[in-house]
Amino acid sequence: MATAAQIPLLLYLKSSFRPDVEYIDGQLREKNMGQYEHSRIQALLAAWFIRHESLWRAIALTEQRLVVSPTRVRLPDVCLVPQGPTPDILTDPPILAIEILSPDDSYSELEERCRDYEALGVLTIWIIDPRTRTARLRHTNRWTETLRLEVPGTPIYADIEQLFADLDRSRQI
């Protein structure tokens, strides 16, 4: 069995990839890229959060490098960070990490990604599945399926029925 070449974290952090890749224990890992629905949901969520940035005092970022441990860097589809100076590479836990499922994503990969976010201190994770038109909120290691995703203790939310309606409407235009 062939093994992948190991690269140092600092080399990864100084490098650019198109599309970007995650760094997992010295190896580069391509993230499953979505198709239209994945991309469109990502854009709709980013637009929603950008409209509310000043009210929620949070900045929306897409596919931003997030160092979750000394050996791992993840790329959440969307994340929210507190307003203020933001480094080029995040090392502090965001307020929220969002993953939009792609057809090739596996449950075990999703769980691994969520454990990485939680190990860093991310308290709230949203998972959105375009195929099943469902969403789950994970807060302090507990999953809840819901139509209204929120960040507990904050005014931050997203209405999933509206998100999927906007997605369907964009297909008809």
Image: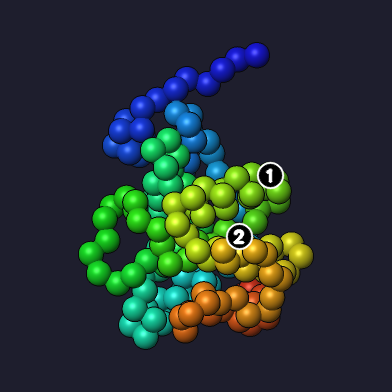
Q: Is residue 1 above or below residue 32?
A: above
Q: Nearer the viewer, residue 120 or 96?
A: 120
Q: Is residue 43 above or below residue 15?
A: below
Colour mode of the rendering:
rainbow
The three-letter code of the residue at mark 2 reads: Asn
- Residue at the spot 49% in from the left edge and 35% down from the top edge: 24
Residue 4's x, y, as percent? Answer: 53, 21
Mark sitting on residue 21: none
> Secondary structure under badge 2?
loop
Give the residue at mark 2.
141
Give the residue at mark 1.
108
| Callout 2 crowding tier (Cα within 10 Å): few <14, some 14–19, many ≥20 | few
Q: Nearer the viewer, residue 165 or 139?
A: 139
Q: Residue furthest top?
A: 1
The three-letter code of the residue at mark 1 reads: Ser
Disc 2 vs disc 1: which is toward the camera?
A: 2
Which of disc 1 and disc 2 is earlier in sequence? 1
- Residue at the spot 46% in from the left edge and 80% down from the top edge: 154
Q: Is residue 20 visible?
A: no
> Secondary structure under badge 1?
helix
